[in-house]
């Protein structure tokens, strides 16, 4: 029985401002260094205020045939108005993938909870 899964929300990021957007190539060479960008609100802006903001992203990779995903990174956005500074919920990371699988991104909105998105990536 899934507990956390009951609280994960998803949708089309073009129509829902909370869904993390994964910017990654559809196919890559094995063990080639690639950049993966995560963002929020690419089509519909998400508020970035003390009262309503994205707190963090998590990025996982689930290789084909694997039982569990591997966490690639956790990215916290800490400034939500302190000294009039606001951390924008955008991050780029680099990774080498040995096999095909699925990128899985989670985001957390302090008001609307957990959101997920995924993208298949083929390693040739």
Image: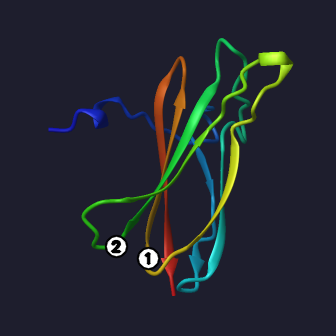
Q: Residues within 10 Å of mark 2 (few under 14, many from 20)?
A: few
Q: Residue at x 64, y 41 (%)?
A: 14
Q: Position of residue 18 (x, y in %)?
A: 58, 32
Residue annotated with mark 2: 64
Residue 29 position in % (x across, y down): 58, 86
Q: Residue at x 72, y 17 (%)?
A: 49
Question: Which SS class for mark 1?
Answer: loop
**Residue 56 percent across, percent down from the top left:** 57, 36
Specify whether 111 is left or right of 94: left
Residue sitting at x 69%, y 14%:
50
Say which of 79 and 98 sits in front.
Answer: 79
Q: Which residue is mark 1?
A: 100
- The circle drawn on residue 31 is none
Look at the numbered discs 1 and 2 and tell me whether their residues touch, using CB distance below 8 Å: yes
Work out which quarter of the rendered image holds the N terminus and state it. Answer: top left
Q: CA distance from mark 1 to mark 2?
A: 6 Å
Q: Is residue 93 above or below residue 9?
A: below
Sequence-first tag of 1 and 2: 2
Q: In x, y percent, where is residue 57?
A: 56, 42
């Amino acid at each position: 029985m899934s507990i956390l899964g009951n609280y994960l929300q998803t949708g089309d990021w073009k129509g829902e401002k909370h869904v993390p957007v994964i910017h990654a190539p559809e196919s890559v060479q094995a063990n080639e260094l690639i950049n993966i960008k995560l963002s929020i609100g690419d089509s519909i802006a998400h508020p970035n205020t003390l009262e309503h903001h994205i707190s963090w992203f998590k990025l996982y990779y689930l290789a084909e045939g694997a039982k569990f995903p591997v966490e690639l990174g956790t990215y916290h956005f800490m400034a939500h108005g302190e000294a009039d500074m606001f951390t924008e919920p955008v991050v780029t990371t680099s990774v080498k993938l040995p096999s095909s699988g699925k990128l899985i991104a989670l985001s957390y909105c302090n008001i609307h909870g957990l959101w997920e998105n995924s993208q298949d990536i083929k390693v040739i």
